[in-house]
Amino acid sequence: MAQLEHRPPADSPPSLWQNRDYMVWWAGTGLSTLGSSVSSIAFPLYALYATGSAVQAGSISAANLIGSVTMTLVGGVLTDRVSRRAIMICGPLAQTVALAVVAWLVQRGCGAPLLPLVACALLSGLASGLTMGAATPALRRIVPREQVGAATAQGMGRDLVAQLIGSPLGGLLFATARWLPFLADAVSYVCAALGVALIRRPLGPDRSETGRQGMFGGLAAGVRMVRHHPYLRFTVVWGAFLNAVTQGFLLLLIALVKYRGGGPTAVGTVNAAALVGGVVGAVVTPRVMRRLRAKTVLVVAMWLFVESFAAVAAVPRPWQIGAVLLVAMVATVPLNVVLESYEARLVPDEFSGRVAAVTRFGMQCLQWTGPLVAGCCADLFGVPGAVLALMIAMLALALVLHRSRSLGVLDIPLEDVVELTGPADGEARGAGTASGGTHG
């Protein structure tokens, strides 16, 4: 007798891997992330080899970050007003030009001057900030809304794998020819633009959504929506402090491995272990999200972080630090998926670019303070003591999750969350969703 085949419900969407538009976008973006990982290693390596100055090496990375943050808010407003497809094609093509110029300058040899390299890094960062504003709204057009969480997890897993491969690949290409990593990154941005061009679905915004607001009026509408909705407001403030603590910990991690007797190879191994943990987290996240409430996922992830801070300060060997980080990083992807999925479900498409830009800017605005505070704590208390000081900050952030009344929306299954209708609607509708109410 033939066995009965298990079939999914008739109304369930097909697998993301059967979604052609998603696949071409996923592949193009993945290749772009791989190229960025390659050049992120090559930029400081070239600056150190050409000038011997760590400050000049850092100035290139800083220019890229400044450009990205500067354009984030502008990109968010534009993505709700002009063609998202055009933004996601023109942005990578601008980065192609910037990296091709870098490759040409380096190929000429004899130490390319610093200023053109900084300018190209700044241009690439500006284009990156512009493109990021369109990514989340476009993803909502490419996949069904109930699959946004799974698509986000898969994207994070893809990016972590790209970073895991990109670091050693960047070193290998740099050893072969110093200009080669930059040319590879330029080609990767062409792949990103091509992936978007091959998407068949309209990516928006619809004509009826563009409105007549000016740039500042559009941005103010996004700020109002975040300010009026309890969940969005909480996650921006809470996420800003979380990112600052995380950035401080990343600085201390290198110092801690050195303090425990590890060299550059040990630092690379610990970093690789963390990335592997992130990949594992991306694999298990869809199952975790189906079995646990979103708030439970958020709380468990935070307590794992607290315990990992205590553990890495106590374990005596670098490999043990890597093992602890691997476990902690497994929780990183589910935490980010919860935050991004509920934001995507709450925010209407016509405001998604602006709100995503406001939340991203808010969550990143304090990152620069983390390394400064961590460095001061290391000078005062020693490296293990500084890690424990950051653990206290992480403990406070975990306890806030238990006390906050702004996370009631996380008690509602993602598919039942009610979409807001506008900035002024955020407070009233936010109260309804937070209390568990839904509308048909």
Image (cartoon, grey):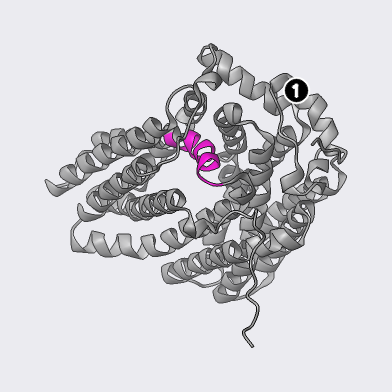
Q: Residue at x 31, y 59 (%)?
A: 170
Q: Which quadrant of the rendered structure holds the N terminus? A: bottom right
Magenta includes 179?
no
Residue 15 visible in image:
yes
Q: Percent x, y for residue 279?
A: 54, 64
Which image quarter: residue 225?
A: top right
**Residue lying furthest front:** 1
Q: How many marks?
A: 1
The residue that disc 1 covers is: 425
Q: Percent x, y for residue 65?
A: 44, 38
Residue 379 visible in image:
no
Check disc 1 and give the amino acid type.
Asp
Segment tinted magenta in the rendering: 131-143
Give the vertical position of 141 relative to 54 (above or below): above
Q: Percent x, y for residue 316?
A: 62, 75
Magenta includes 132?
yes
Q: Residue at x 24, y 37 (%)?
A: 97
- Badge 1 density bin: few <14, some 14–19, many ≥20, Cα 10 Å: some
Q: Which quadrant of the rendered structure holds the C terminus? A: top right
Magenta highlight: main SS: helix
Q: Residue at x 59, y 55 (%)?
A: 150
Left-right relation of 335 to 280? right
Q: Percent x, y for residue 64?
A: 39, 38
Left-right relation of 411 to 220? right
